[in-house]
Amino acid sequence: MVFGCGNTLNDEAIVKLSSIFGTSGGMGVLKGYRLHESLQIYKSLSVVQVLKTIPQAIILVPRTILRCIQQRSRWPWDNFDRYLDIPLQEIRKEFGIRVARFRKNQNDA
């Protein structure tokens, strides 16, 4: 939630890119996407769903990577416990994280 995404296919792509480029986990984050649960999710996607995301990806991918590069520092992938009681707005300010998308019903406290 620190990157401000929901669970749509496009938002999931933003989360994956942000996890790789905007956290201390880097490319090691990809190991988690080989899990059985992740593979089941990928297999459940329809061709139509995937094709609909391609035109948006032309904008989302470079924008997400650029935003991650512009962060003040990387979100700690493994050592985030100390941030559990800190409001998201303060966390985002500290790391220079720009929210990918705001939803009207998103609780940003």
Image (spheres, helix red, strand yellow):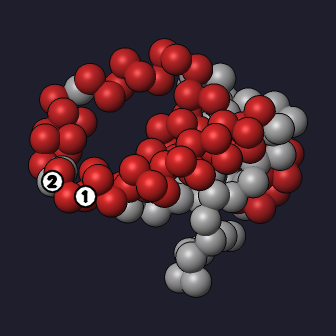
Residue 60 in sight from this viewpoint = yes
Residue 21 at what x, y percent from top left? 63, 29
Q: Is residue 62 above or below residue 92?
A: above
Q: Residues within 10 Å of mark 1 (few under 14, many from 20)?
A: few
Query: Left or right of 105: which side holds 36?
Result: left
Residue for point 57% across, 42% down: 61
Front residue of 37/51: it is 51
Quadrant where the C terminus is found in the figure: bottom right
Q: Is residue 73 left or right of residue 102?
A: right
Tell me the tag on residue 46: 2
Residue placed at 26% from the left, 23% from the top? 34
What residue lies at 13% left-to-right and 41% top-to-bottom? 43
Q: Amino acid at mark 2?
A: Ser
Q: Nearer the viewer, residue 79 or 26?
A: 26
SS category of the residue bearing label 2 = loop
| Quadrant that contains the N terminus | bottom right
Residue 37 visible? The answer is: no
Pointers 1 and 2 in contact (C-beta within 8 Å): yes
Task: Judge left or right: residue 95 versus residue 102.
Answer: right
User: Spatial distance from mark 1 to mark 2, Cα to Cα?
Assistant: 5 Å
On screen, 34 above or below 3?
A: above
Q: From the viewer's perspective, is 32 left or right of 35?
A: right
Point out residue 59 in the picture as x, y percentages from the top left corner. Answer: 59, 52
Which residue is identified by label 1? 49
Specify few, some or many for label 2: CA neighbours under 10 Å numbering under 14, 14-19, or 20 or more. Answer: few
- Give above or below for 4 relative to 65: below
Q: Residue 102, image x and y in percent?
A: 62, 71
Quarter of the view holding residue 18: top right
Residue at 46% over, 62% down: 6
* Quadrant of the rendered image containing residue 41: top left
Location of residue 75 by image quarter: top right
